[in-house]
Image: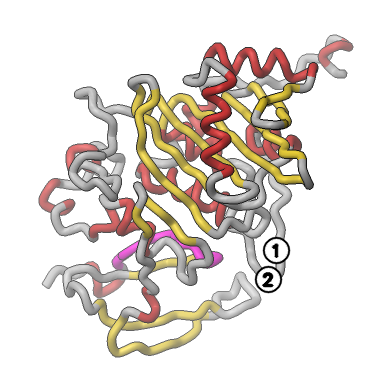
């Protein structure tokens, strides 16, 4: 290796994890990155669960899917930077391309994260477990964990520094994946980001089946909205349930937030006086379909809903005459 021959190599400071997370000024965009990973065709999850719980006095966010799971190589790439081999599968285009979604998303939400992933291979269940940069492979036999010799040090680090200090505690989390199917991935984020006054930036108490962003947190974002402007913002700006309703133009995956299914809203079919057209920019080969219509729920909520690869990019973005206040 270059370092062994005395050649200086590039390094990555752990603080970059925080720097990388600042690409998300809005907390829900960080959550969307984790949803996208389960939605993409290589994972192909049918359901995705989002929940809040307490573990040893720590507020935690839990994200879980019943998709294909991650093997050692895929999980290692997920923990690394810039690795992505996602491709179109059966006509389904992946949303993620650059191998950065998990790192930027999870580290935006909290300072620590642990990932459990389970693959079903005949009668053997392979478990892939990672915490920060410790990664180990376990096999589950008759309800007991068996660890490969070369991964014992990684397992000890996980038991020492994570929220889970015994193998039985790890087993309980793995059983949660088993309850949803033969395979899947479970991400737990803790040491959640907090406001300057102390509380987490999420409101878990106003609604038992939703996760919301308080007004004072939205006021402190880089957009610097005034409170009067925030009061007229669409519900999807501060309610995770409302945001997930419109996250995908044509949903293929069911999202469950705090035990309650999200009722998806097909934006293109919920409008009145619908008209359709196409836009052909010079820099792309294909035409971009455009759907026009009136919002039937609120005349104050209007603008362009931008979707790319079936995923919402911008919501209620006002342009042209829409910017004029009447």
Would residue 226 appear left or right of 31 to someone viewing this image? left
When the figure is inspected, residue 111 is found, relative to residue 106, above or below; the finding is above
Q: Which residue is drawn at 52% across and 28% down?
A: 17
Q: Do the residues labelled 2 and 1 touch (CB within 8 Å)?
A: yes
* Residue hosting label 1: 88
When the figure is inspected, residue 174 is found, relative to residue 160, above or below; the finding is below
Query: Residue 260 in the image: x percent, y percent?
Result: 34, 55
Q: Give the range drawn in magenta.
A: 309-318
* Residue hosting label 2: 91
Q: Which residue is drawn at 58% across and 25% down?
A: 131
Magenta: main secondary structure: strand
- Viewer-side residue, 41 vs 51: 51
Query: Residue 165 in the image: x percent, y percent?
Result: 52, 15
Mark 2 surroundings: few (<14), some (14-19) or many (≥20) residues within 10 A: few
- Viewer-side residue, 113 vs 326: 113
Q: Could you tell me how far apart the alpha carbons at marks 2 and 1 are, in whole angstroms?
A: 6 Å
Q: Residue at x 65, y 18 (%)?
A: 155
Kindly identify which numbered label has been placed on residue 33: none
Query: Residue 272 in the image: x percent, y percent?
Result: 28, 86
- Viewer-side residue, 272 vs 142: 142
Residue 121 belongs to the span the image colors magenta = no
Would residue 210 appear left or right of 298 to someone viewing this image? right
- Viewer-side residue, 219 vs 194: 194
Would residue 238 appear left or right of 185 to someone viewing this image? left
């Amino acid at each position: 290796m270059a370092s062994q021959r005395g050649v200086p190599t590039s390094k990555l400071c752990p603080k970059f994890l925080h720097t990388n997370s600042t690409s998300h000024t809005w907390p829900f965009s960080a959550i969307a990155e984790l949803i996208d990973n389960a939605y993409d065709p290589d994972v192909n999850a049918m359901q995705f669960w989002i929940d809040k719980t307490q573990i040893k006095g720590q507020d935690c966010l839990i994200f879980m899917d019943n998709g294909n799971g991650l093997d050692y190589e895929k999980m290692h790439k997920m923990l690394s930077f810039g690795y992505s081999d996602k491709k179109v599968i059966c006509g389904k285009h992946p949303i993620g391309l650059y191998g950065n979604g998990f790192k930027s998303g999870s580290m935006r939400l909290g300072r620590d994260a642990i990932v459990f992933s389970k693959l079903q291979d005949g009668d053997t269940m392979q478990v892939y477990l990672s915490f920060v940069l410790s990664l180990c492979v376990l096999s589950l036999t008759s309800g007991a964990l068996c660890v490969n010799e070369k991964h014992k040090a990684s397992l000890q680090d996980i038991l020492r520094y994570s929220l889970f200090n015994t193998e039985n505690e790890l087993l309980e989390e793995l059983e949660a994946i088993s309850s949803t199917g033969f395979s899947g991935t479970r991400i737990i984020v803790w040491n959640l980001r907090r406001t300057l006054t102390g509380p987490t930036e999420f409101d878990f108490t106003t609604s038992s089946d939703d996760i919301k962003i308080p007004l004072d947190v939205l006021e402190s974002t880089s957009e610097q909205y005034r409170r009067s402007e925030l009061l007229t913002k669409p519900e999807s700006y501060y309610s995770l349930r409302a945001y997930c309703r419109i996250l995908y133009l044509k949903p293929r995956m069911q999202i469950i937030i705090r035990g309650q299914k999200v009722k998806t809203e097909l934006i293109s079919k919920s409008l009145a006086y619908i008209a359709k057209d196409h836009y052909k920019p010079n820099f792309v080969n294909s035409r971009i379909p455009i759907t026009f219509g009136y919002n039937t729920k609120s005349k104050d909520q209007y603008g362009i809903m931008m979707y790319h690869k079936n995923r919402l990019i911008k919501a209620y973005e006002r342009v042209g005459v829409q910017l004029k206040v009447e």
